[in-house]
Image (cartoon, coloured by chain):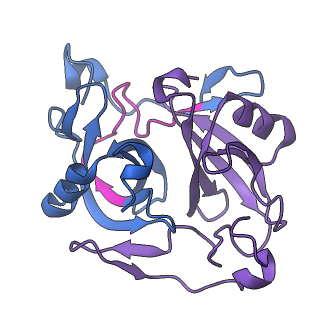
Chain colours: A purple, B blue
């Protein structure tokens, strides 16, 4: 994998293996990818917290890995997953891609909330 | 959009609007995203060529934009497209994600070629 090309981090696309929906995009360093493959649960490298971040570590909304694909240049991965729980987004949606971007740059919500983020995360911002 | 957070470039996931398959991942700066929305054809910023790159500019395998979604942190976009032609990958596949990554780090091809890259690209490496 070409981690060096992107300063040690590669984008990791998360796709629902059953529906094909894109759930989120995170970043992985070599260690995060190895941990994802070892544990069978998606583990990112959090740029804001500067540490490995097992998705769902506090919410319980884990992402079970069903398949790992790599692109032609080995600088991006596609994780096909079975999501545990009602959604992956810290704002309470099934997918983080819940807004349409208009030609004028404005974002419009196009999905319904699937859970109450306050109940799941309490005061914590993330997941 | 939070371009500054990632040094001016955000990841752009390309998904076939009809099948849900992930075709590729590229990067966009503010200008590339604006050009994508203006023209209706996916336009990346090529990190290797350091310029805007209209996908399919040489091969004719354009990506017609059907929808643009943005994630909760406004630092990634999801482009739902209608692909023109037999594939997006410069190696001759419909999707750039044509390899499975094994637990030991080895990549195995899991898709069939859909076109002959030499015929489409000639001596040029890209697309």
Query: Does residue B80 sit above or below A51 in this rendering?
Result: below
Q: Nearer the viewer, residue B127 or A11?
A: A11
Is residue A104 one of those drawn in magenta?
A: no
Q: Nearer the viewer, residue B59 or A32?
A: A32
User: Quarter of the image holding residue A106?
Assistant: bottom left
Q: Position of residue A19 (x, y in %)?
A: 61, 65
Query: Does residue A53 sit above or below B106 in this rendering?
Result: below
User: Quarter of the image holding residue A17?
Assistant: bottom right
- Residues in magenta? B80-99
Residue A58 visible in the shown view: yes
Residue at 30 percent of width and 25 percent of height: B48
Residue at 48 percent of width and 49 percent of height: B22
Q: Is residue A41 left or right of residue A45?
A: right
Please identify the dominant SS of the magenta region.
loop
Q: Is residue A17 left or right of residue A84?
A: left
Q: Position of residue B33 (x, y in %)?
A: 25, 55
User: If the image is split into quadrants, where does the N terminus of chain A sit?
Assistant: top right
User: If the image is split into quadrants, where does the C terminus of chain A sit?
Assistant: bottom right
Residue at 71 percent of width and 86 percent of height: A116
Residue B12 visible in the shown view: no
Q: Position of residue A8 (x, y in %)?
A: 57, 28
């Amino acid at each position: 994998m070409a981690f060096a090309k992107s300063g040690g981090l590669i984008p990791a696309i998360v796709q629902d293996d059953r529906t094909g929906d894109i759930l989120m995009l995170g970043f992985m360093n070599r260690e995060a990818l190895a941990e994802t493959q070892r544990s069978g649960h998606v583990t990112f490298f959090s740029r804001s917290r500067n540490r490995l971040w097992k998705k769902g570590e506090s919410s319980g909304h884990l992402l079970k890995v069903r398949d790992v694909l790599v692109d032609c240049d080995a600088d991006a991965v596609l994780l096909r997953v079975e999501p545990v729980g009602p959604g992956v987004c810290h704002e309470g949606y099934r997918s983080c891609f819940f807004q349409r971007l208009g030609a004028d740059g404005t974002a419009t919500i196009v999905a319904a909330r699937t859970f109450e983020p306050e109940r799941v995360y309490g005061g914590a911002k993330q997941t």
